[in-house]
């Protein structure tokens, strides 16, 4: 990948090819869409790098003091080599960006791949195509906020923290000295807080810009107009707060602050300006001088920034991450406007030339954005994304040995969690012709509990022993999502019929691995727990609906609801997204009702949550739209489905009631099921009965393997579509 770097010794700027950062636990890997150049902080660093060694020393006396301490401790030679080695190294630039989550590290559950996030930090939000960003240094971008505007998040947080330090109140008057990028944002935030703002800057264009964005009056620091505006707005008392957002070596801002402040006013230093406080002026007014430390509480604290340890909100209301999220919210609600601040947008490939133009004064700007390759090509033609549906090959391997139809079907369960013990095992325990042979879990007690409750003959933690037991006919894989593909492949290779809960696989490679096991072993005895097509109510409704001749339109609303805090479903880095884990149910149901496998997938996600809209297209022109939402009320039914075709409508209300409407030559017809007296039957019992029958008789599996593979590939294509922002073609392997 490419990254902007600078050699502090020589002043050289370069767009360097560097390795892609790894996605460590506790953070996310973000592909940058836009990054913002801080025309104050960054240009100061660029300018310093171009100085002589004496000039560098004069500009950074704090670093000179450290060098002298090192000389006293380690001697001249070692210190010289250490300093020269550090100076003659590439250092990064940048600290404010917006991008798309490309990979989610372990322990992250508040964003998912494809989400848009704003990122902060001079070590993590760099001018680079990819950045690893720890949890407390990113925030999800609200729905509808443009990425180029969200890229202002960090500088907005700096301005916001400065405003918070000033503690503004409704009706007060504030003076903002320096109307660069930070000063412009400070002025807007104060105006949004009900404070009247007077701005000071020697650049008339910046003064005009600030007035256009809400400042009451702006002018040159040497002009009488500023003093007159302050006197008029404050009745001659002086401003309540002064915000120093200027840089440079002049002491004028500090002196002006004292002159125009009221008695016991507040002076907040946000920028890096000279602070030789005129003692008499500050003493006589008893001015309260405050400093604003970057983005807010948490800055420079490794336990907060790197380890993700948040501060309790009851003790620290506004941390740097909360400031970041708050500023994004203000942008999304049009309380702050950054579009007028954008002076120039440069392609990332032109980064070095852009810095040179800024440094030399050819490009005069308040804010400059880098636009990264994918954004630059957004309006052009792009290659359509594809997900390959692997071909099912059954060559090789020996057929499964014949079994006696009179012998009980002996089952082993790998995993005995909530779903297995509530939705599967109750239908199998005590069933005629079924013997629960062995339960395998990773913890001894859970295996023992399942053995006691459901009557397994054995309980163990040894999976190899179970797979090697020739008396076991079928293995149920009911573990966490990330292990499904591997365990399924091992059981197939061991010659077992396999029932695996959804999802079959979380990646294309995992899916290919399962099919490689089928080909190697010749064993295709596989069923995935897509139970809804077996639901009696849906089966009956399908029969009432009858055959169709034209394309159909299907709408499936899934009110999935929120997950409880701590649920392992939230471990997206290892267990996949919620839709990856559950979405196969709904795709399989749609495909079964439409009688075909999808050929393309288009997915759109809401920002900040797991809500999805998935549109599936089928060979005959039929479409299925799955609305998977997590933000609906729990009082609303979980699943409602409508199928429309040929003048007919099938309606399913949460597996409690179904109806079919039709019109024809005989007039209007309507069939409505009776309300079920028992709990919802989503087909688990019928599905298990079909699987057991197939194992006992050696007949076909309840769902063809090709259909299971197509549904899994379509589920994977949803994630690919979210990342690419375009329809994904499902391409069959030849």
Image (cartoon, grey):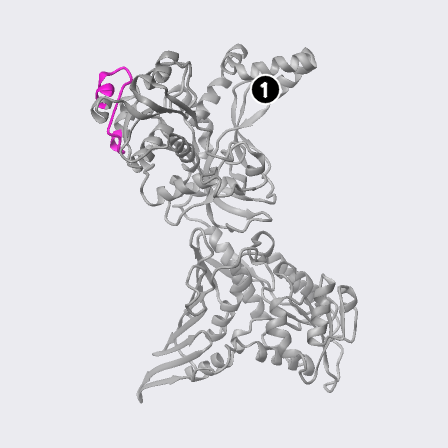
Residue 440, percent from left and from top: 72, 67
Q: Nearer the viewer, residue 558 or 421?
A: 421
Where disc 1 sits, the SS reads: helix
Q: Is residue 622 visible?
A: yes
Q: Is residue 256 above or below residue 198?
A: above
Residue 173 to residue 721: above or below: above
Residue at 79% in and 67% down: 465
Quadrant housing residue 278: top left
Q: Is residue 51 magenta?
A: no
Q: Nearer the viewer, residue 259 or 34?
A: 259
Residue at 40% x, 20% y: name it: 247
* Magenta region includes residue 216: yes
**In the rendered image, is residue 520 in sight?**
no
Tell me the quarter of the image containing the C terminus. bottom right
Q: Is residue 484 left or right of residue 173?
A: right
Q: Indicate the position of residue 223 as horizontal and vertical percent values.
A: 24, 16
Residue labelled with disc 1: 87
Residue range (magenta) = 211-229
Left/right of residue 339 with respect to residue 562 in the rendered view: left
Say few, some or many: other residues with alpha carbon within 10 Å of mark 1 (under 14 / 14 to 19 / 20 or more).
some
């Amino acid at each position: 990948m490419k990254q902007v770097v600078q050699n502090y010794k020589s002043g050289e700027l370069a767009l360097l090819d560097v390795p892609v950062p790894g996605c460590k636990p506790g953070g996310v890997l973000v592909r940058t869409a836009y990054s913002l150049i801080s025309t104050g902080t960054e240009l100061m660093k660029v300018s310093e790098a171009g100085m002589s060694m004496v000039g560098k020393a004069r500009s950074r006396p704090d670093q000179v003091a450290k060098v002298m301490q090192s000389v006293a401790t380690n001697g001249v030679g070692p210190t010289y080599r250490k300093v020269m080695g550090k100076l003659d190294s590439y250092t990064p630039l940048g600290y404010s960006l917006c991008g798309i989550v490309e990979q989610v590290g372990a322990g992250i559950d508040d964003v998912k791949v494809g989400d848009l996030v704003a990122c902060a930090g001079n070590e993590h939000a760099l001018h680079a195509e990819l950045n690893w960003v720890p949890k407390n240094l990113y925030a999800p971008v609200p729905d509808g906020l443009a990425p180029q505007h969200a890229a202002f998040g960090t500088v907005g947080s700096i301005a916001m923290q400065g405003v918070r330090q000033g503690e503004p109140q409704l009706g007060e008057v504030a003076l903002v000295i320096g109307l660069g990028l930070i000063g412009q944002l400070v002025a807007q935030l104060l105006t949004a807080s009900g404070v009247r703002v007077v701005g000071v800057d020697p650049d008339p264009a910046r003064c005009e810009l600030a007035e256009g964005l809400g400042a009451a009056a702006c002018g040159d620091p040497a002009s009488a107009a500023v003093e007159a505006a302050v006197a008029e707005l404050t009745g001659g008392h002086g401003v309540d707060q002064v915000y120093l957002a200027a840089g440079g070596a002049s002491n004028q801002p500090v002196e002006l602050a004292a002159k125009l402040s009221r008695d016991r006013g507040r002076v907040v230093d946000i920028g890096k300006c000279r602070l030789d406080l005129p003692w008499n002026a500050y003493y006589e007014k008893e001015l309260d001088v405050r400093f604003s430390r970057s983005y807010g509480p948490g800055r420079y604290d490794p336990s907060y920034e790197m380890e993700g340890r948040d501060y309790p909100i009851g003790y620290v209301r506004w941390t740097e991450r909360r400031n970041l999220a708050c500023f994004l919210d203000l942008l999304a609600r049009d309380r702050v406007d950054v579009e007028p601040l954008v002076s120039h947008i440069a392609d990332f490939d032109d980064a070095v030339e852009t810095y040179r133009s800024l440094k030399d004064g050819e490009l005069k700007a308040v804010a400059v954005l880098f636009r990264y390759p994918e954004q630059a090509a957004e309006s052009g033609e792009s290659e359509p994304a594809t997900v390959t549906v692997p071909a099912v090959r059954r060559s090789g391997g020996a057929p499964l040995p014949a079994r006696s139809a009179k012998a009980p079907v002996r089952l082993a369960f790998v995993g005995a969690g909530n779903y297995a013990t509530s939705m599967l095992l109750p239908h199998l325990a005590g069933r005629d012709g079924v013997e629960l042979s062995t339960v395998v879990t990773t913890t001894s007690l859970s295996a023992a509990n399942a053995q006691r409750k459901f009557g397994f003959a054995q309980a163990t933690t040894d999976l190899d022993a179970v797979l090697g037991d020739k008396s076991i006919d079928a293995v149920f894989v009911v573990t966490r999502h990330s292990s499904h593909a591997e365990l399924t492949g091992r059981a197939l290779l061991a010659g077992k019929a396999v029932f695996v809960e959804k999802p079959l696989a979380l990646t294309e490679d995992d899916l290919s691995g399962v099919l490689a096991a089928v080909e190697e072993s010749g064993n295709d005895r596989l069923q995935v727990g897509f139970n809804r097509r077996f639901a009696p109510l849906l089966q009956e409704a399908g029969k009432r609906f009858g055959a169709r001749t034209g394309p159909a339109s299907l709408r499936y609303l899934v009110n999935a609801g929120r997950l409880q805090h701590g649920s392992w479903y939230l471990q997206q880095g290892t267990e996949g997204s919620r839709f990856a884990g559950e979405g196969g149910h709904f795709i399989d149901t749609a495909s079964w009702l439409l009688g075909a496998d999808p050929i393309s997938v288009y997915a759109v996600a809401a920002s900040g949550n797991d809500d999805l809209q998935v549109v599936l297209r089928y060979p005959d022109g039929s479409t299925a739209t799955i609305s998977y939402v997590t933000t609906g009320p729990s009082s609303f039914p979980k699943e409602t489905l409508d199928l429309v075709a040929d003048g007919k409508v099938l309606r399913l209300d949460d597996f409690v009631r179904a109806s079919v409407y039709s019109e024809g030559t005989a007039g209007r017809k309507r069939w409505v099921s009776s309300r079920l007296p028992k709990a919802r039957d989503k087909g688990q019992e019928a599905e298990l009965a079909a699987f057991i029958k197939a194992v006992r008789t050696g007949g076909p599996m309840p769902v063809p393997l090709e259909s299971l593979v197509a549904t899994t590939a379509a589920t994977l294509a949803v994630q690919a579509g979210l990342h690419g922002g375009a329809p994904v073609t499902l391409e069959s392997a030849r």
